[in-house]
Image (cartoon, grey):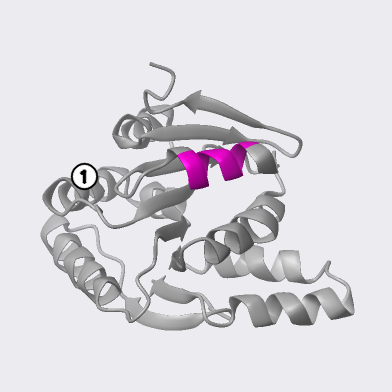
């Protein structure tokens, strides 16, 4: 599993690419997200996390509870300087909060917020290479049409050319049609289970 993720994210994905990581509600995705992805991405180009409704924090705390004492302390130290964009209510007990945003389903307000976040990230002293998101499917679930219009408006008007986007999406939460919208605009789509990673869309690498 780790080999496929490392090869794709560090070798094949380019700045500006969007990578969708699909999982089910029964998958212990915190093991992949916090145990593998966050350390990998942080070590290879700095990392910003966007956390919708504290979903990332809930998974972080679930992962942390199962770590032994020394590893626990080392991991808390590892993530303390990860930059975090907090979107909506919910706790954020990890990282360094760069901005807090009220969630919106109005495309024009979302675009304005998105532009402000991208500008803020671009001015960081250490330019990040990766932007990872938690809770994107939850955001879409609460207002499917508004969320999709807002996201499409943002990414088509202000492409994320300086970052590789890595987005965890729970396919059980949103409809197949709405998931298809994310899959269409993504460069890579992967399916994550407890035991393996399957590549569903390879970004044309195989051509």
> Image quarter for residue 42?
bottom right
Residue 51 x/y as whole percent: 46, 66
**Residue 38, above or below 64:** above
183, 76: nearer the viewer:
76
Residue 34 x/y as whole percent: 65, 61
**Residue 95, above or below 151:** below
53, 3: nearer the viewer:
3
Farthest residue toward the right? 68
Residue 11 x/y as whole percent: 49, 41
Q: Is residue 89 magenta?
A: no
> In the shown orientation, is residue 178 left or right of residue 167?
left
Q: Is residue 149 visible?
A: yes
Q: Residue at x 19, y 53 (%)?
A: 154
Farthest residue toward the top? 207
**Residue 73, above or below 156:** below
Count numbered badges in the picture: 1
Q: Is residue 89 visible?
A: no
Q: Is residue 10 magenta?
A: yes
Q: Residue at x 25, y 78 (%)?
A: 123
Q: Name the residue beneath numbered marker 1.
A: 152
Q: Residue at x 25, y 71 (%)?
A: 122
> In the shown orientation, is residue 42 left or right of residue 154?
right
> Which segment is the magenta one?
4-11
Q: Please, what is the dominant secondary structure of the magenta stretch? A: helix
200, 182: nearer the viewer:
200
> Image quarter for residue 193?
top right
Q: Which corner quadrant holds the N terminus?
A: top right
User: Dot 1 lies on which element?
Assistant: helix
């Amino acid at each position: 599993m780790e080999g496929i993720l490392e090869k794709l994210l560090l070798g094949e994905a380019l700045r500006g690419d969007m990578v969708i990581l699909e999982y089910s509600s029964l998958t212990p995705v915190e093991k992949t997200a916090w145990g593998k992805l966050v350390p990998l991405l942080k070590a290879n180009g700095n990392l910003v996390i966007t956390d919708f409704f504290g979903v990332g924090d809930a998974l972080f705390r679930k992962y942390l509870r199962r770590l032994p004492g020394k590893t626990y302390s080392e991991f808390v130290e590892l993530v303390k300087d990860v930059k975090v964009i907090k979107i909506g209510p919910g706790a954020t007990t990890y990282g360094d909060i760069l901005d807090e945003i009220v969630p919106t389903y109005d495309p024009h307000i979302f675009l304005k917020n998105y532009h402000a976040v991208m500008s803020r990230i671009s001015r960081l002293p250490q330019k990040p290479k990766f932007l990872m998101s938690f809770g994107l499917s939850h955001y879409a679930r609460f207002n499917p049409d508004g969320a999709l219009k807002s996201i499409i408006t943002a990414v088509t008007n202000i492409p994320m050319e300086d970052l590789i986007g890595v987005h965890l999406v729970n396919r059980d939460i949103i409809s197949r049609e709405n998931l298809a919208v994310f899959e269409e605009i993504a460069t890579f789509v992967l399916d994550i289970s407890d035991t393996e990673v399957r590549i569903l869309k390879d970004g044309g690498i195989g051509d």
